Image (spheres, grey):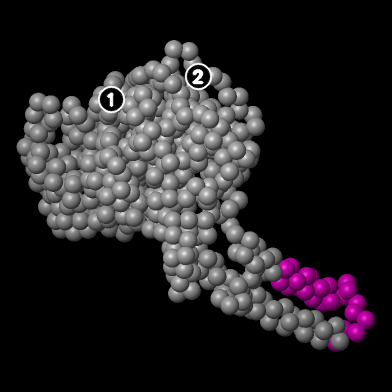
Amino acid sequence: MAADLPDPTENTQRAEPAEPVENTERTESTETTEPVENTERTEGADVAEGAEGAEGAEGAEADGIIARPPRRGTRGRIVMLVDNSVHGDSRVQKQAASAAAAGWDVVLLGKYSGKEEETVWMLGEAEVRLIGVKAKMSTRPKDLRGAPMRRPLAYPSERVADFRLQQVKAWRADLRVRGAALKTGEDRSPLGSVGGRVWLAARRGAARATGRWVKLRMRHTRKLRTIRRTRSTPLDRATTAFWLTTMGDRAWRRLDPAVWDFELAYGPVIDELRPDIIHANDFRMLGVGARAKLRARAAGRRVSLVWDAHEYLPGVRSWSNQRKLPAMVAYEREHAKYADAVVTVSGGLADLLQRTHRLPERPAVVLNAPEAADASRFTDLPVPDLRALCGIGPDVPLLVYSGLAARQRGLDIMVDGLPELPGVHVVFVASHPELPYILRLMKRAEELGVRDRVHALPYVPHWQVVSFLSTADVGVIPIHHWPNHEIALITKFFEYSHARLPLVVSDVRTMAEVTRQTGQGEVFEAENVEDYVRAVRAVLDAPKRYTAAYEVEGRLDEWVWEAQAEVLDGVYTRLMRGAGDGRNP
């Protein structure tokens, strides 16, 4: 394994300012700025597609970073890593702020998305830096060439196709002008008026034929683009199987080398910061942290690696590129053994990780729970009024969904059920009210005649979420059955609970079990509109029956971040005392 890693003594690559970024949808396990600050919550359930295929326009350059010494009187330096822009990830924000408050010198490194005005700021006593990531390895050289075996009529790239189409348009535009000139006598053809018209007609015919040929090739080019994007043809599947068989866990180097872009951008910054502990959030940062640890060890410095696993990677909904999931599973397996400690978001996921990676001890569980601290802790801004933003009064029944807006989250059912719930309103609190999926929901609501009862709002800062949601009547979690959804209580479950909202949740295993056990809500069959409507009616008819569950003494005490921070601090303390040496390669 170690032979496949870059020489720890020779990594002198420096991060450069990155270029404009594509969608950086929040990671809930995968980030945007809104009228109300977007500080989305991490949930161990999904991986946003294309998160690593973007380039930031700016961001901190490794060459320009001055590695200040750890603050005096601190317990050691922790460098935290995340593959998003930090703004959209409450879990890492809470990790950084609480660790710094506990006496650690914390530097949190995130990815510059091309939208942030600041690339360095303070989060409590923790320092946040955004790094520009140049996505240079997401497109391979052979993808810029033609593919005669797959689509012989396709152009080498869409840029070539676009040029050819514009070229034909320009040709036909020129012929129209020349025809007008011949007609008015302003252009005398050496062939005479009749000969000029015949020549012009022939050229127009050639232009039309060429245009049809170019459009045919463009259709093949688009199909080739789809093939290259999805990698789902029989040939692609055979190639993927070949590399997985011959290279094993090293196969990601062939199947999805784009993850190297994170290594080349983050690695030099980590090296200059000289951490005592590296806290790597999720699978992409696991590899980056593992390699930084190896380089530090080769330089004679003791560094411990904490892997914070936000999801069970083999159980996530696959990316459109069918090679990416097996590649990232292999990437995670290759680097998991370098972690000195593992933490994760649920007990079920802890058990899965221990079995899958043969971990010597069960990962510590750090729930995605909200903070118990005052909602104005980080700002003087008042908590926005959810109902006022929806334009409704206090007596209007309001169902809220807060979190990642994606098809697998089942939000369609909240719109489809409205015709059977007269007078009831729905609000989606998401990273961006104009997301394509949200717009599709709005279009569906219009088709059903309920558009006036469907609202979409942006996120508020994570420390305001509980207060913000508390004026709703019901918190809805309609997620579909995916392996990752079955094993954890996701962030919104805890947020709704602290907002003391009765719940309506789909029958994914862990969440349904807890909801039935506590009596804090109704469970419905996932993707069953009729059963969903039944559950909503039951809760709206007798809300106090469900909110009584929150009056049980101690029920919410463990569902707060402060309790989770103590667990995490215990992990750091043990590593600093040397307990992590047993996992060192």
Q: Distance between the residues labelled 1 and 2?
A: 22 Å
- Residue 566 numbered mark, or none: 1
Does the rendering let one see residue 512?
Answer: yes
**Residue at mark 2:** 70
Image location of residue 336, percent across then percent down: 39, 45
Count of numbered circles in the view: 2
Question: Which residue lies at the image location 46% right of the left edge and 31% below the top edge?
Answer: 303
Image location of residue 536, percent across then percent down: 15, 47
Question: Which residue lies at the image location 14% right of the left edge and 42% below the top edge?
Answer: 514
Q: Are marks 1 and 2 in contact (CB under 8 Å)?
A: no
Image location of residue 409, percent across then percent down: 30, 51
Could you classify mark 1 by the number of other residues whose Cα lies within 10 Å: few (under 14), some (14-19), or many (20 or more)? some
Question: Which residue lies at the image location 50% right of the left edge and 41% below the top edge?
Answer: 291
Label 2 secondary element: loop
Q: Which is nearer the N-term, disc 1 or disc 2?
A: 2
Q: Is residue 176 left or right of residue 522?
A: right
Question: Which residue lies at the image location 27% right of the left edge and 54% below the top edge?
Answer: 483
Could you classify mark 2 by the number of other residues whose Cα lies within 10 Å: few (under 14), some (14-19), or many (20 or more)? some
Q: In which quarter of the image is residue 267?
A: top right
Is residue 581 in the magenta section? no
Q: Which amino acid does label 1 sit on?
A: Glu
Q: Which amino acid does label 2 sit on?
A: Pro
Residue 438 versus residue 48: which sits nearer the camera? 48
The span picked out in magenta is: 166-194
